[in-house]
């Protein structure tokens, strides 16, 4: 971005407004009771009218806001690495994260928008339109939760998020994906100390950890970079972490647009205090 371009802090409220508008468009379709998938993508996941409509709205709005910054969306992700490697900054977007939850009408879906700079998210907005709540963060500032939906202004009643530290010998609050197989996590659940388990859709899992309402989410199946970019920054700014899950140790925080594939490695999202437990379990999980 040039020196004349808006700063990340100046962009934040405008991106919140874009995410809210996309959420309103999704809810317009949701209210028609029209959540039937219109097609299947190459990975056999469903695509709905809401996915397409939110994608168009976000792409047009971000392109108008920052014309020189590319937009990489789940619904337009077929950009070769040779082109992508030239991008120092770009927008990473999932216009409807949790399409299966949208189809099932349980409300657990989100709009995810992140600004990536040097492979790291520096601005994030997650809008949960059916729940009338939004989450946002920017590098070097606290993660925030705000009321959204009709009649709410973007900066009204902002609440600072703080992930709650987990202490050994206290019950662990584990999150699992609502719509994906639990089998890959089976070996982990057997090794975990006393814990409760709750199932939840979309990027809301990382937001729950950021809000101090859960401790750990393990993802051992495929996800796209658009699924995690915004959630990662919100969790990090709340004191948590989202890192690669290696065979025998925890890896680094996820990076973006580094590889030909836009599919994430296995990862763990967790609250402060959980990392030593995971390191110990990785040495026992063989």
Image: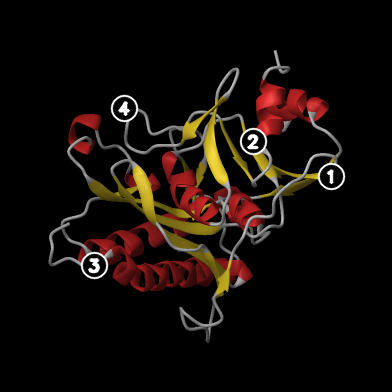
Point out the tag, 4 or 3, that comes first from the N-terminus: 3
Q: Is residue 143 left or right of residue 178?
A: left
Give the alpha-carbon distance from disc 1 to disc 2, as whole Å: 15 Å
Q: Position of residue 274 (x, y in %)?
A: 68, 39
| Mark 3 / mark 2, whichever is N-terminal | 3
**SS at badge 4:** loop
Q: Position of residue 235 (x, y in %)?
A: 54, 52
Residue at 24% from the left image edge and 31% from the top image edge: 81
> Residue beneath label 1, please?
170
Cα–Cα gap, marks 3 and 1: 47 Å
Q: Is residue 252 above or below residue 145?
A: above
Label 3, on which residue?
65
Q: Which residue is mark 2?
A: 275
Q: Residue at x 31, y 27 (%)?
A: 260
Residue 187 on image: x %, y %: 76, 23
Q: How many marks?
A: 4
Dot placed on the residue nearer the N-terminal end, 1 or 2: 1
Real-space Cα distance between discs 4 and 3?
Answer: 28 Å
* Helix, strand or loop for disc 2: helix
* Sequence-first tag of 2 and 4: 4
On screen, residue 192 versus residue 139, left or right, reads right
Of helix, strand and loop, which one carries label 1? loop
Query: Disc 3 or disc 2, which is closer to the eye?
Result: 2
């Amino acid at each position: 971005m040039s020196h004349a371009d808006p700063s990340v802090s100046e962009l934040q409220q405008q991106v919140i407004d874009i995410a809210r508008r996309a959420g309103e468009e999704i809810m317009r379709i949701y209210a028609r009771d029209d959540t039937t998938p219109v097609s299947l993508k190459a990975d056999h996941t469903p695509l709905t009218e809401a996915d397409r409509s939110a994608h168009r709205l976000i792409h047009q709005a971000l392109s108008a806001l920052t014309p020189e910054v590319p937009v990489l969306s789940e619904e337009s992700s077929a950009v070769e690495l040779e082109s992508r490697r030239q991008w120092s900054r770009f927008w990473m977007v999932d216009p409807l994260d949790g399409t299966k939850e949208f189809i099932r009408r349980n409300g657990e879906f989100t709009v995810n928008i992140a600004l990536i700079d040097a492979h790291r998210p520096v601005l994030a907005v997650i809008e949960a339109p059916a729940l009338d709540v939004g989450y946002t963060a920017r590098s070097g500032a606290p993660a925030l939760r705000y009321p959204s939906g009709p009649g709410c202004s973007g900066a009204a009643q902002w609440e600072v998020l703080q992930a709650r530290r987990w202490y050994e010998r206290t019950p662990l609050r584990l999150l699992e994906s609502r719509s994906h197989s639990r089998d890959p996590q089976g070996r982990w659940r057997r090794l975990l100390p006393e814990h409760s388990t709750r199932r939840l859709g979309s990027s809301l899992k990382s937001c729950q950890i950021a809000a101090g309402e859960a401790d750990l989410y393990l993802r051992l199946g495929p996800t796209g970079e658009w699924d995690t970019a915004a959630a990662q920054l919100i969790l990090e700014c709340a004191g948590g972490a989202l890192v690669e899950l290696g065979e025998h140790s925890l890896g680094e925080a996820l990076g973006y647009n580094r590889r030909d594939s836009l599919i994430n490695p296995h990862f763990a999202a967790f609250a402060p205090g959980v990392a030593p437990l995971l390191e110990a379990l990785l040495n026992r999980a063989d």
